[in-house]
Amino acid sequence: MAELKLNHIYKVYDNGHKAVNDFCIDIKDKEFIVFVGPSGCGKSTTLRMIAGLEKITAGDLFIGDTLVNDMEPKDRDIAMVFQNYALYPHMTVYDNMAFGLRNRRIPEDVIKEKVLKAANTLDITDYLSKKPKEMSGGQRQRVALGRAIVREPKVFLLDEPLSNLDAKLRAQMRTEITKLHKELQTTFIYVTHDQVEAMTMGTRIVVMKAGYVQQIDTPMNLYDKPYNQFVAGFIGTPQMNFFDVKLQRKGDKVNMLMPDESTVVLNYDSFAKVHGSYLDGEKDVIFGIRPDHIILSEKDTGLKVRVTAVEHLGNESIIYGNLGEEKKDFTMKDEGKSIIIKDTNNTKVEVDDVVFIGFKEDKIHLFDKSTQVTLILDVPASNYVKAELDGDTLSVLNGKVKLPAAVLAKLEGHKDLALEIAPSAIVKGNSLKLKVKRVEQVDDKYLAHLVYEDHYVFALVDEKVKEGDTYAFDVEFDKVKAFDGEEELLAPIGENEHLDGKFVKKDINRKEVEFYYVIGGTQISDTLGNGFKINSVDGNECYSKTYKYVFNRDKVVVGQGEIKATALELLDYGHVKYVKAKVGEEELLLVVPEGLELSNGQEFSFDVKGKDVEVWDKKNDFRIC
Ligand code: ADP
């Protein structure tokens, strides 16, 4: 039984190479997690840090509830299986499997029982007296697995265990490892560069690129909802098709201008979550469509493909071609216009044919041309709406809202405004009303598509609202951005606050030390024992350096505690009141709890718990723990 928690893990090699950056994941007991990505992306480094074979530069690694950053590999209760098997050549299979147990002085009869059981599971009983060199690659890998199984570890780590095997054996071993995972009921972490291996084996997959996690998700979600173009292209064979397009909205349709100058007409509803600025016919957008989501059509769809090659695979055909009618040699791939189609209907298609194609509209992917991030998120980042201010009243979303004092103070004197409202800022209330067109469940919440002018406004709500109903709501202005032209007048208040501070060590006696964060002149006990970590990152310089202490505003208790502050200004956002406070020479925003009366200039105190504090390297903006 083991859960693992990787908390902001970094690896910087001695030569300065940042191999792993800010790796975070909570791995549940019995999960089969796969790290996948191209060679050099940091998969093995991460696995080796979990194993204890590589030192963690920054971040916390927990196995179960234990922080294991500095624990020896042998004490971590994990077993690792390598690509090259790492068997002892002069020992028999039996002895190879028994070796680790003998080292731990386990009685020979217990060892025998464990080895025979594992050999039986892996179907290598007949080979127990052979030496590794008398066995095939597949059999050797089974022995390596057997050697791991007999140790009954909490976690199995497997580093490209199948990459030395031929394709057929690899496919067979894949199924066997999946079966083994089910039988052993243990947490598996598996590294591979092969996306098929990842997709067929993982309960969740971590896709990595150049030291950064790109997406952590189930195989299905990676396939259907890739977060960026890299994940979209990496997962799935044949690869997703990408085209540079421009999109122009025309009423309830969207025209998509393809690279061959043809235009595909699609329904606006498929683009409802795409920000309007991408639908102006000017902006460059990357359109992605998987080969399986292209439909060969008998009718003229307006989009033609000249076929350059066909692979008939029996149950399906893979058709290669180029957009447009122009004849091209297959070897002369038409950059930006080449297309791969997967046809499962046995359509008769031959080289040089011109076919009409259409797209399954609910399977369309769109990416920003410069960031390559998807333009269709389950929950859009924000809603963009226009608003007009008159006195203290804002006309917005077909209604009028009396602005809370703190918001009015920022917007006063301006008239025409553009707002960015987070879907979570639209909450059940009574000042505004819009009709609900659709409701989608997103995790444990609901995303309501509210009809506003010619597009939708999205509200992320706790309660299930009904399609066709009118939804009455308020806007929480602490999650709103407001602009007058280019000028930003109002910014959302984030979740976190920070203060600078020092770090001190106190010797209790010869063996024991205690560490404290000094925040606002007050010593906050480092209850997580992070001191050793900070010391191992920065050496003794840590006692003279200034750190950035970051904490969640909700975790701060205002009105009690030891950190002294002065209230500079009270900010009334309607549903919540903030106080701009001065601590030493620094300023921060805190939530005023209900019932506490504060006035400008008043002194008050607050409390932050050591366990809620993150320690950041101030200069390099790098989280240490
Ligand atoms: P992967 O397993 O994804 O192929 P690795 O984790 O092995 O990638 O390596 C990640 C990056 O770190 C690569 O660029 C590699 O060259 C570099 N690297 C690996 N080991 C060391 C080392 N000991 N010193 C410096 N750089 C290293």
Image (tube, rainbow, N blue to C red):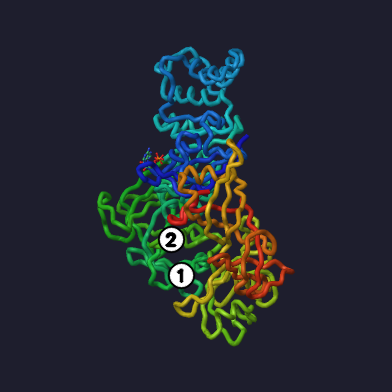
Q: Amino acid at mark 2?
A: Phe
Cα gap from disc 2 to disc 1, whole angstroms: 16 Å
Front label number (2 vs 1): 2
Q: Amino acid at mark 1?
A: Val
Judged from the image, the secondary structure of the residue bearing numbered disc 2 is: strand
Query: What residue did someone put label 1 on?
Result: 254
User: Between 523 and 553, which is closer to the camera in this rendering?
Assistant: 523
Answer with the quarter of the image where residue 519 lies: bottom right
Q: What residue sits 48% from the left and 38% below the top?
A: 49
Disc assigned to residue 15:
none
| Coordinates of residue 110 in the picture (x, y in percent) | 61, 16
| Coordinates of residue 80 in the picture (x, y in percent) | 49, 30
User: Between 221 and 344, which is closer to the camera in this rendering?
Assistant: 221
Query: What residue did someone put label 2 on?
Result: 367
Residue 596 appears in the figure: yes
| Coordinates of residue 301 in the picture (x, y in percent) | 41, 64
Residue closest to the far bottom? 391
Q: What residue sits 62% from the left and 69% below the top?
A: 566
Judged from the image, the secondary structure of the residue bearing numbered disc 1 is: strand
Question: Where 382 sits versus 126, above or below?
Answer: below
Tell me whether the residue at label 2 lies in contact with that at label 1, contact meaning CB atoms closer than 8 angstroms: no
Answer with the quarter of the image where residue 259 lies: bottom left
The quarter of the rendering in which ligand 1 is drawn is: top left
Question: Where 142 sits versus 174, above or below?
Answer: above
- Mark 2: give few (<14), some (14-19) or many (20+) Cα within 10 Å: many
Lateral position of residue 599 relative to residue 153, left or right: right
| Coordinates of residue 169 in the picture (x, y in percent) | 44, 29
Q: What residue sits 58% from the left and 45% below the top?
A: 506
Label 1 CB-ligand 1 distance < 8 A: no
Mark earlier in primary sequence (2, 1): 1
